[in-house]
Image (spheres, rainbow, N blue to C red):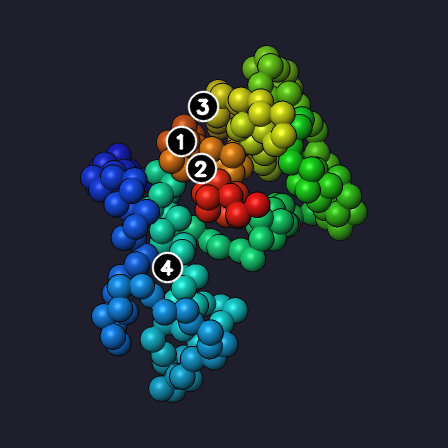
Amino acid sequence: MSPALVARRQEKGFSTRAVHVGSDPDQATNAVIQPISLSTTFKQDAVGVHKGYEYGRSGNPNRDSLERLLASLEAGGEEAIAFSSGSAATATIIQSLGPNSHIVSVSDVYGGTFRYMTRVAAANQGLETTFVDLENASEDDIAAAIRENTKLIWVESPTNPTLKLIDIRRIADIAHTHASAPLVLVDNTFLSPYWSSPLLNGADIVMHSLTKYINGHSD
């Protein structure tokens, strides 16, 4: 994202964006709270001619509003994709790396992510994962863990549950100057966009478990 676009996005404060982005008045009634859309199918005037929605699994007004809001709150972001769970987002990202890929992951990554990497993706797509203490490892050690087929560096900061703090800018610089040029993903669940903006520190992808701090922690 260009610096000018980031600046324009930040003209409105975090609280203003949290309240108003994605919450346009309902076009039919001017209700200030968007009604819940329960429809699975949407009327088409002709094949492929519609108002932006055709079937619930491919698009939904409520989901679109949530994605606009998340993209606004995550400074430096342009687009967001909402999934049914954090685990679904994890699976989609890892599957997108393709077969026989390699990931460098923070050593104490969230247990569900660890199990998906080492049990599910390892069996289904031949994924290999190297776990590194990204808080304390030297730059040379981190760079040495990156292979020719390394597609992603997986970061949590703070980590769950030991709360290790990772220097996101340092990891991004190592990744983006390496010949393999892996993407850098940051799981920002524990800090939320209010406290941390990984994209502005060089991360390529940010993800959240929305039932945690960004949602007031429903647990």
The residue pinned by badge 4 equals 65
Q: Nearer the viewer, residue 76 or 24?
A: 24
Amino acid type, label 4: Ser
User: On the image, which quarter does residue 3 sit in?
Assistant: top left
Q: Residue 123: x and y, percent?
A: 79, 47
Query: Which mark is first along the chain, 4 or 2?
Result: 4
Report helix, strand or loop for mark 3. helix
Q: Nearer the viewer, mark 2 or mark 3?
A: 2
Q: Residue 54: x and y, percent?
A: 44, 76
Residue plotted at (47% across, 33% down): 191
The residue pinned by badge 1 equals 195
Query: Which mark is first along the chain, 4 or 3?
Result: 4
Report helix, strand or loop for mark 4. helix
Q: How far, Cα to Cα, is label 1 from label 3?
A: 15 Å
Picture disc at residue 192: 2
- Marks 1 and 2: in contact by CB < 8 Å? yes
Q: How far, Cα to Cα, is label 2 from label 3?
A: 17 Å
Picture disc at residue 169: 3
User: On the image, which quarter does residue 106 sit in?
Assistant: top right
Residue plotted at (39% across, 48% down): 70
Q: How far, Cα to Cα, is label 3 from label 4?
A: 30 Å
Report helix, strand or loop for mark 1. helix
Q: Nearer the viewer, mark 1 or mark 3?
A: 1
Name the image quarter holding the C terminus.
top right
Q: Of all residues shown, which one is farthest toward the front?
A: 219
Q: Nearer the viewer, residue 169 or 88?
A: 88
Q: Is residue 125 left or right of residue 105?
A: right
Amino acid type, label 1: Trp
Q: Is residue 130 left or right of residue 3?
A: right
Q: Is residue 60 above or below residue 154?
A: below
Query: Which mark is first along the chain, 4 or 1?
Result: 4
